Image: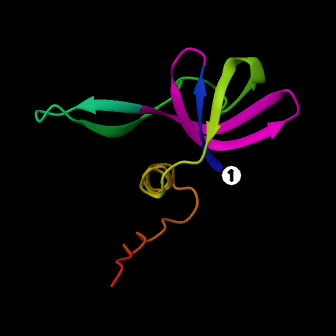
Amino acid sequence: MIKCIKLVTGEDLIGDVEVQGDSLTIETPCAVVLIPTQEHQYSVGLAPFLPFAASKKFSYSREHVVLVYEAADQLKNEYNRITGKGIVLPERPKLELV
């Protein structure tokens, strides 16, 4: 399932995450990168994680993972688009109270 993880090093990764007991495996991970804009805000980008590694599947001990969290739909869509995995979901309509 596509999820984000935060490592003890401070890096945020998105990828196909599977938790198995005391270990966690992430396949085809991308680093989530904050890019400063001119308006003193941030944009979010995805960068290849360990692009020269022979394998695209990495295992971590749970002690090296601070947090596993659900990625926002927009981030999942961008991940799916650039990796060619999964389906790009349409944006959810904003609900208004009348």
Label 1 SS: loop
Q: Is residue 87 above or below residue 9?
A: below
Give the residue drawn at x 49%, y 68%.
89
Q: Amino acid at mark 1?
A: Met
Most distant residue in the front direction: 98
Q: Quadrant of residue 55?
A: top right
Q: Which residue is mark 1?
A: 1
Q: Residue at x 42, y 56 (%)?
A: 74
Which picture quadrant has residue 4? top right
- Tell which residue pokes out farthest to the bottom in this image: 98
| Magenta stretch: includes residue 17 | yes
Query: Percent x, y for residue 67?
Result: 64, 31
Mark 1 neighbour class, 10 Å CA radius: few under 14, some 14 to 19, many 20 or more = few
The image quarter containing residue 22 is top right
In the image, is 77 to the left or to the right of 62? left
Residues rendered magenta in the picture: 8-32
Q: Nearer the viewer, residue 58 or 62?
A: 62
For residue 44, above or below residue 70: above
Magenta span main SS: strand
Residue 23 position within the rendered picture, expressed as x and y whole percent measured from the top left: 81, 28
The structure residue drawn at horizontal position 48% and vertical position 49%, both measured from the top left corner, is 79
Please count the marks in the image.
1
> In which quadrant of the rendered image does the C terminus lie?
bottom left
The location of residue 73, given as percent across then percent down, is: 48, 58
Q: Is residue 62 magenta?
A: no
Q: Residue furthest top?
A: 9
Q: Which is nearer the eye, 66 or 3? A: 66
